[in-house]
Amino acid sequence: MGSLIPIGGGADAEIQNLLNTAFNATNIKIVRTKVANENLLDDNHHLHRIAYRLGTYPIGNYTGDDAKGKWFYFLKHILKNAEFNGVLTAKSIKMTLAYALRNSTGTTDIGKLVDTTGTLSVVLVCPNSLPNQSIPIPNQQADLDVDSHGSIIEKPPIKLFTPHDLSPPLLSPTTRRPRRSKTTKTRVAKKARAKTRKTKAKKTKKATKAKKGK
């Protein structure tokens, strides 16, 4: 997915990685279910909202660069007005994604967008330098996708993933296995304490029965 974008490092590389992860073999199953239930890629859903909900936006700190704001400006304004041969670029992107998410196999009905290996290809050509403009990051209360009557059509949960969830797990320097989060450690510790209390209670119960037997 994101690997098709010929870019450098920094925020661009982060976006690339997040796109790759959001549509990897595991996460694409979640996205497919959401697309089927909500028609997430129709004309009433917008790319900046979809990116927010998928978690495909940079969260890194880039000095002097509002990477998140610029990425959402690009999705909300630049692509909204861009077109090729009378077809809006945003619509083309969503149509291609919709096909890929609804058809895990097969290369029919999409014509020249599919090569002999069954890979969907989309090329975005930017004729001019993008403006250095940004917008606020979308959130769960404002700027929601609505239908033609103005009714909110976004279904909960608002976000499918968060960039943190899509990030590679931190490995322990000793075991080289994913580190457990504080939440997981707390949960494991609680289970261990509960198990200890249960074991002590059983021993006390057995000791009481033994005394009564005497």
Image: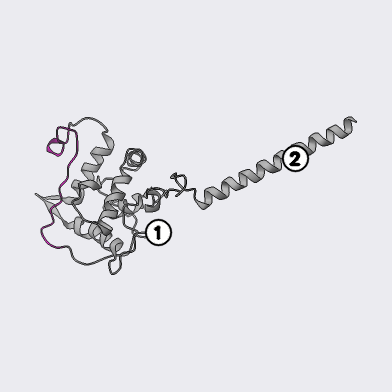
Q: Badge 2, how many Cα within 10 Å: few under 14, some, many 20+?
A: few
Is residue 47 left or right of 210 when viewed as pictured?
Answer: left
Residues in magenta, as a range:
109-129
Residue 69, given in percent of the width and then of the height, sits at 29, 63
Residue 121, given in percent of the width and then of the height, sits at 17, 42
Amino acid type of the residue that numbered disc 1 sits on in the rendered structure: Gln
Is residue 141 left or right of 189 when viewed as pictured?
Answer: left
Q: Nearer the viewer, residue 91 or 68?
A: 68
Closer to the chain start, of discs 1 and 2, is: 1
Q: How many marks?
A: 2
Answer whether labels 1 and 2 touch (C-beta < 8 Å). no
Per the image, the residue denoted by label 2 is 201
Is residue 85 left or right of 72 when viewed as pictured?
Answer: left
Specify the quadrant that holds the C terminus: top right
Q: Nearer the viewer, residue 184 or 1?
A: 184
Measured along the vertical axis of the image, is residue 82 above or below residue 65?
above
Camera-near label (1 vs 2) is: 2
* Quarter location, residue 29: top left
Measured along the vertical axis of the image, is residue 115 above or below residue 192?
above
Residue positioned most to the front: 174
Per the image, the residue denoted by label 1 is 141
Q: Secondary structure at mark 2?
A: helix
- Write the residue at 34% across / 49% down: 54
